[in-house]
Image (spheres, rainbow, N blue to C red):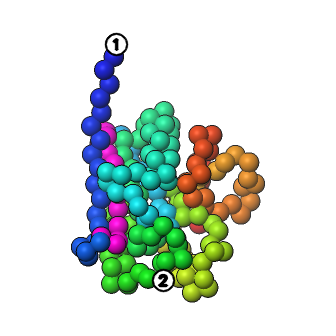
Amino acid sequence: MILASENIKSIAVFSEDINNEYRYILKWEWDCNKKKATVIMLNPSTATHQKFDTTIMNVHNFIIDYENESYGSYSIVNLFAYRCTDPKLLVNRKLDYEMKNDTFLKDSFEYSDIIIVAWGRDFSKVNAVTKCDINIRISNVLEMLRVYQDKIFIFWDGKEELINIKPRHPVLLKSYWALIQYTI
């Protein structure tokens, strides 16, 4: 019989408003001597430092398995810090809370060995104002990422043509997906 045990440190930073409506970062660490990953998505949903949603569970399992378990931690950051399950609700976010988000993005990018851009590609279900805000935010964050070009990747399902490929969201992440370099 083999007893296996692992201490996983989890951290979340939320806004100080009554409902913690903004989440700036989620981080899990199980081996500080291994490489670090950052995954950047659109906006936080319901996950916390204690509770996984489907997306976080998929990312967690992928990072643990990636490159023969050579990663020991990962951070989840987002274009927007406002927590909602439907991106249409991003119109309700407050800019004074959102302005704090860039610090967490920049710190995560700086201290990661790999940055996985995973904010998705289909924003057709949001209204025109939100779509415009998303596109502006993507442009701003891509500028932040430009200095880290050599460590930027996206999820790839192995089927899609690599010409003009766009970031995929990991909610439907499968075990056969891979990471490919993403050129800004």
Classed neighbour count for the residue bearing mark 2: other residues with Cα under 10 Å, few (<14), some (14–19), many (≥20): some
Residue at label 2? Answer: 91
Q: Is residue 27 visible?
A: no
Image check: 107 left or right of 119? left
Residue at the extreme bottom = 129
Q: Percent position (x, y) of residue 101?
A: 36, 73
For mark 2, give the secondary structure: helix
Q: Residue at x 53, y 60 (%)?
A: 117
Q: Which residues are magenta?
A: 20-32
Image check: 23 left or right of 132? left
For mark 1, give the secondary structure: loop
For the residue marked with disc 2, what is the amino acid?
Answer: Val
Classify residue 13 by image quadrant. bottom left
Q: Percent position (x, y) of residue 7?
A: 27, 37
Q: Residue at x 33, y 79 (%)?
A: 97
Classed neighbour count for the residue bearing mark 1: other residues with Cα under 10 Å, few (<14), some (14–19), many (≥20): few
The answer to which of marks 2 and 1 sits earlier in the sequence is 1
For the residue marked with disc 1, what is the amino acid?
Answer: Met
Disc 2 to disc 1, C-alpha distance = 54 Å
Instruction: Tell me the quadrant of the picture where the C terminus can be found.
Output: bottom right
Q: Residue at x 39, y 67 (%)?
A: 105
Residue at label 1? Answer: 1
